[in-house]
Image (cartoon, rainbow, N blue to C red):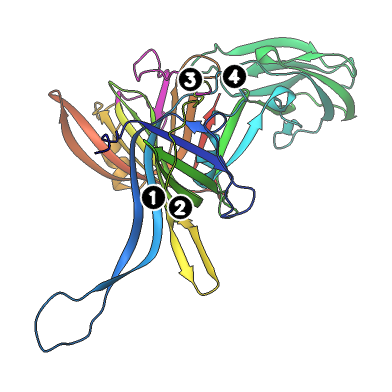
Amino acid sequence: MADEQYYDKLALMVKAETAYGEDAGPSSTANAILAQNVRIKPMAAEQIERKFYRNFWGARPKLRTGRHVTFDYEIEAAGSGTPGVAPAYAPILRMGALAQTAVVGLATIAATAVPANGALGRFTYAKTTKFDGAYKRAVTLTCTTAGGSGVAAFTVSAPQTPGDAAYSVTGVVMTTASPFTLPGGAVITPSAISVNFALGDALTIALTPERVLYTPVSGGVESCTTYANLDGTLHVGLGCHAEIGLKISKKGFPIWNVQSWGLFVPITASGLPTDCDYSGFKDPDESAPETVPVFRLDGYAPALSELTIQLGNKVGLRQVVNRRGIRVSGRDATASLTIDAPPLAEKDYYALVDSSATVPLWVRHGTVAGNRIDVEATAQLQEVDLADDENIKTLQIKAGLQPTLGNDEVVFSIL
């Protein structure tokens, strides 16, 4: 009799496809995924009962239709170790209807300054030295001496962030072809002043850290090929798409949860790879006060026990004549969180829920460059319940994440 096969001897490999449903051939050396709590439905399908009548009672046979495979698993949420470099699990986020954008180098400085209403002065600049800060900064240039190149002077200011004191430098003269210093080591070089500045003119320049952004899309979702070798048995899914969520909870690590669907491929015997390379997966930080420097809900900083963000992708098999595929056909993103109940005099979340208020949500997990995760969302607070956590009164809040301009209800940044 053959030896038993072990469930935890598993090699999971995921690779982006160049054409939908065509095997991308993921390898153990380049595409291995360090996953946990892996669950595979090797032959998921619908059962259609045949409904004929007979002259006796008994079970009717069923036919299987819509055969596909599902792979559900979790991945520790950590960065690549280098700001602006995508993590090893990036293809999985992209097959979950997220677009990937790297912001590196001089892209950390906005291309243009945005004038305030009524500001007359205008200038253009070259981006000279990248921004090295860890938090976004909105830098305001306020004209204190009117004029053009070599004459116009400014107060350069930026509000404080969770990691930076407020910035303010006065009497900074703007001269074309000369460096102009901004917070966080950023430097621009004005190239032309097309309209001289008037006293009181204000312009804003946005600075952002080096990071990889993941934003929702409403079409054109990337697909992946998934291989799962379970101790010598190979399960393959083609054209995979996924529902993605992120969970941050006390006494644990942040976790991406993945529910993926793929087109069925016959199951085969195949030797378990012995050369899986997991070196691209970095150690996560636990969720603790010193490793979660920021949590804000409508500008207030309550004590957070748990936060779960779900994209709410509508994923499934669509099979019609001349077409078969795993499709993402919509999205309904949500958030659920558990916080210590604050004094009503400080923050009244009951009133916000009662008014269906839409508020900003921001959390940052991690403090080391290259291993930080930001979540920024626009949350409509919809339900609130009371709960007991170690005899501490807590609020369990459910929210719907609301888009403003479209595909902006939640943004994940790995930085």
Q: Secondary structure at mark 1?
A: strand
Residue at point 68% right, 18% down?
Answer: 131
Q: CA distance from mark 2 to mark 4?
A: 31 Å
Residue at point 45% right, 19% down?
Answer: 366
- x then y, percent, for residue 173: 82, 13
Residue under pointer 2? 262
Between marks 2 and 3 in the image, the one whose residue lies nearer the viewer: 2
Q: Would you say residue 182 sits in the magenta stretch?
A: no
| 245 vs 109, nearest the viewer | 245
Residue under pointer 4? 82
Q: CA distance from mark 2 to mark 3?
A: 27 Å
Residue under pointer 3? 282
Q: Amino acid at mark 4?
A: Thr
Closer to the N terminus: mark 3 or mark 4? Answer: 4
Q: Secondary structure at mark 2?
A: strand
| 402 vs 200, nearest the viewer | 402
* Crowd tier of the residue under label 1, counting other residues whose Cα lies within 10 Å: few below 14, some 14–19, many 20 or above: many
Residue under pointer 1? 70
Q: CA distance from mark 3 to mark 4?
A: 11 Å
Q: Secondary structure at mark 4?
A: loop
Magenta segment, which residues? 280-304
- Tell me the quarter of the picture where residue 128 sits: top right
| 237 vs 132, nearest the viewer | 237
Q: CA distance from mark 4 to mark 1?
A: 32 Å
**Is the residue 343 above or below the residue 380 in the image?**
above
